[in-house]
Image (cartoon, helix red, strand yellow):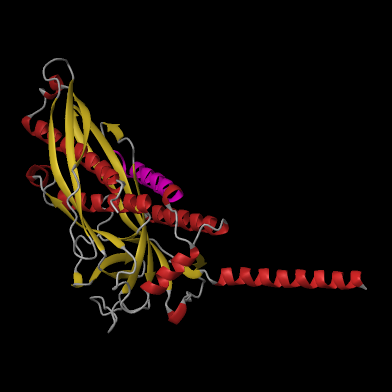
Amino acid sequence: MKRLLTYCLTVLCCAVWMLEGAGVARAAEQSLVPVTLAPFLATMPGAADGQELLSGDVQLAVYQKIKNQLLRMQGNGELPFQLVLQDSTGSDHSFANDFSLELMPIVTLDRAFDVHARAQGVDYYASTVVSGLNLALVSRTTMVSESEDVMAADGKKSMRLLSILPMGARTLEPKQSIGQPVSIETKRAIYEDITEQAIATQMVFRAKVEDFHKFVEKALKPGGNSDNTFRTYQVTGVTFRSPRAKNEIFPGEKGQKLQQLLASVYTAAFQQAHNQVVLPSVFGNDALDQNINRMRINTPLGEQELSWEQPTNKITLDVYGVNDGVMDPGKAATEHHMYKAWLTQQEIDANGQAAAPAEPLTKHLILIDVPEADKALSEQDRLAKKQQTEYYAFTSLFYDLSNELAQQKRKK
């Protein structure tokens, strides 16, 4: 009888344990916030820069790589949310209070920086390809203020952007060509390759399930993060302290491209180094009011708009200085030309307190010149070569500086 009673109690305890375990498993599964992957790859206006790196085939390939990586991560339990693929009916999957959450891939950079030089009657070309990509967590049906939904210019409701996971990459060495420019097909292949590498190595979600749930729940409430419960970071400006950089090397449109490049690179490196909530830079975008920013994106469904509150912490990058010169003039058939650049940053916190500007970070690059070959060039060709070389050298330097500056240890 005792044995029978012991056996029954053991079976009962096991059954209870199994039921409790199943309940915990279901609770854990239910606690995952459902997030739908957008069925397209969005782009920012002007992202392709006329290079057409994002052809239809490349767009599909990049989107498929993102989708496959997310599915792999979900299978390995590496996502703090439940990834949902949009079904054929296009139905939305919702969080509490009918809030629809979506993960939207947005291309921020698909650009080739090209250099052309002519020496002894031969044309030399080089192309550096840069890729930038954001995974934006957005809500299509939520308010961003206490009183009303923010409306886009076309009268449609603006989507709410909660945060981004930025990624970026560039070719380590320029692709070179003699006699003819680097073909657009080659640039596209390079862009697809470095973007795939960025997706494989940089698509990392470090938030725990419970932290992600709390963040979303807080962010989706009317007023959002207006009480600064959590910190958000955004590059809100890239300034030119150096007159030479602004007026000679990066005038006009070149300066705008550099601003976009540095902000994108810094944002990706900052998020990866410090695991903070980051927001996209807002160059060329209009503010709705003091508290809200907006950004237009291109999608297969037409132009759409994202909006979000001002960040708690605003970061300004400053192109502090540039310089260059020949290291060993006239001493050999070749000359070593050094290019040097300085970049700094300043941060304003949630209380409006500006930290002291960081000490300028500096970096140099040495390129080899052949003075004898340059003598055969016309004055126009010599000037064009000088401008192209400076543009390439200083763009490369500032790219690296923005990446390194973002990774510096932060003062608490």
Residue 247 in percent (x, y) is at 8, 46
Magenta segment's dominant SS is helix
Determine the image quadrant of residue 8. bottom right
* 160 horizontally vs 121: left or right: right
* 36 horizontally vs 233: left or right: right
- Tell which residue pokes out farthest to the right in this image: 1
**From where the camera sits, is residue 53 visible?**
no
**Which residue lies at the image location 44% right of the left edge and 47% below the top edge?**
201
Q: Is residue 293 above or below residue 166?
A: below
Q: Is residue 44 magenta?
A: no
* 234 horizontally vs 42: left or right: left
Residue 167 in percent (x, y) is at 36, 52
Determine the image quadrant of residue 214. bottom left
Q: Is residue 198 magenta?
A: yes
Determine the image quadrant of residue 349. bottom left
Residue 135 in percent (x, y) is at 39, 60
**Which residue lies at the image location 37% right of the left edge and 43% below the top edge?**
190
Q: Nearer the viewer, residue 245 or 27?
A: 27
Q: Is residue 269 above or below residue 230?
A: above
- Tell which residue pokes out farthest to the front in this image: 2
Of the 4 image quadrants, the one containing the N terminus is: bottom right
**Which residue lies at the image location 54% right of the left edge and 55% below the top edge?**
72
**Which residue lies at the image location 22% right of the left edge and 43% below the top edge?**
398
Start and end of the magenta stretch?
Answer: 181-200
Q: Nearer the viewer, residue 406 or 386?
A: 406
Q: Nearer the viewer, residue 118 or 371?
A: 371
